[in-house]
Image (cartoon, coloured by chain):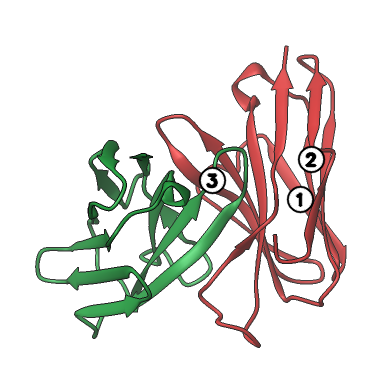
Chain colours: A red, B green
């Protein structure tokens, strides 16, 4: 999993509660990404970061915010979780020092919103 | 928007046979990638083909790209049980950092 860890790996929460997922990497990779994976939709990009405090929206960013205050951590926050945000969330990295276009994925976080 | 559409959605073959899966996309790209996902795991990069390439090989994998038809195919030769996984194509049509993935092909190799 390219030295990427995600926490928690599983989470059950209730509608309306805030949730923060963490992606951690130890090799100073520049780009970090958050995706969600749902049946019938493949992976869809939520947000990505191209440096500390530099982020941009992806295809399905509504209802999500991100922060990157240091290189190694990229946080995904659901301010008020909804049942439609039940999904598997994957973090990924890419790095111009490697093959810039290639992304390396973490193990995923399964989130269930009741 | 789903840039990559994959076909078939599911494929079941006998061990030793070849497996072919296809990906179509809608707009111009600089490159197309294929990833594999084993059940319950993250995606793993397999191969990247650039828009000026027509064919690329990596071990038992052969990828073709036809930019005139906006399509790509992934061929796995001499399949093994360990090849059982879902396979996704991804394009950079929205920018190098905004990969757009297809829905995937679920491949099952029967012993």
Please name the residue that numbered disc 1 is placed on.
Answer: A66
Looking at the image, which residue is at 42% across and 36% down? A41
Q: Secondary structure at mark 1?
A: strand
Q: List the single residue furthest toward the left.
A: B68
B38 in relation to A80, above or below: below
Q: Looking at this view, is A82 or A4 the one in front?
A: A4
Query: Real-space Cα distance between discs 2 and 3?
Result: 27 Å
Looking at the rendered image, the disc whose residue lies closer to the viewer, 2 or 3, is 3
Residue A77's disc number: 2
Marks 2/1 same chain = yes
- Asked if residue B57 shows in the view, the reply is yes
Percent position of residue A93, x then y? 67, 66
Percent position of residue B62, x then y? 27, 70
Looking at the image, which residue is at 72% across and 76% down? A30
Marks 2/3 same chain = no
Looking at the rendered image, the disc whose residue lies closer to the viewer, 3 or 1, is 3
Residue A4 is left or right of residue B27, and the answer is: right
């Amino acid at each position: 999993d390219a030295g990427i860890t995600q926490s928690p790996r599983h989470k059950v929460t209730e509608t309306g509660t805030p949730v923060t997922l963490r992606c951690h990497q130890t090799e100073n990779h520049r780009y970090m990404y958050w995706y969600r994976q749902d049946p019938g939709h493949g992976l869809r990009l939520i947000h990505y970061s191209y440096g500390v405090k530099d982020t941009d929206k992806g295809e399905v960013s509504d209802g999500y915010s991100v922060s990157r205050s240091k290189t190694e951590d990229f946080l995904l926050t659901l301010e008020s979780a909804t049942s439609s945000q039940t999904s598997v969330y994957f973090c990924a990295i890419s790095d111009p020092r490697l093959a810039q276009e290639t992304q390396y994925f973490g193990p995923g976080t399964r989130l269930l919103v009741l | 928007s789903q840039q990559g559409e994959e076909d078939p959605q599911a494929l079941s073959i006998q061990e030793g046979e070849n497996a072919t899966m296809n990906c179509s996309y809608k707009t111009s790209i600089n490159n197309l990638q294929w990833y594999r996902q084993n059940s319950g795991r993250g995606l793993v990069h397999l191969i990247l083909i650039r828009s000026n390439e027509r064919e690329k090989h990596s071990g038992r994998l052969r990828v073709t790209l036809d930019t005139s038809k906006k399509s790509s195919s992934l061929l796995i030769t001499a399949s093994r049980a360990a090849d059982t996984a879902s396979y996704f194509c991804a394009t950079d049509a929205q920018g190098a950092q905004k990969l757009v993935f297809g829905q995937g092909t679920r491949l099952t190799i029967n012993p």
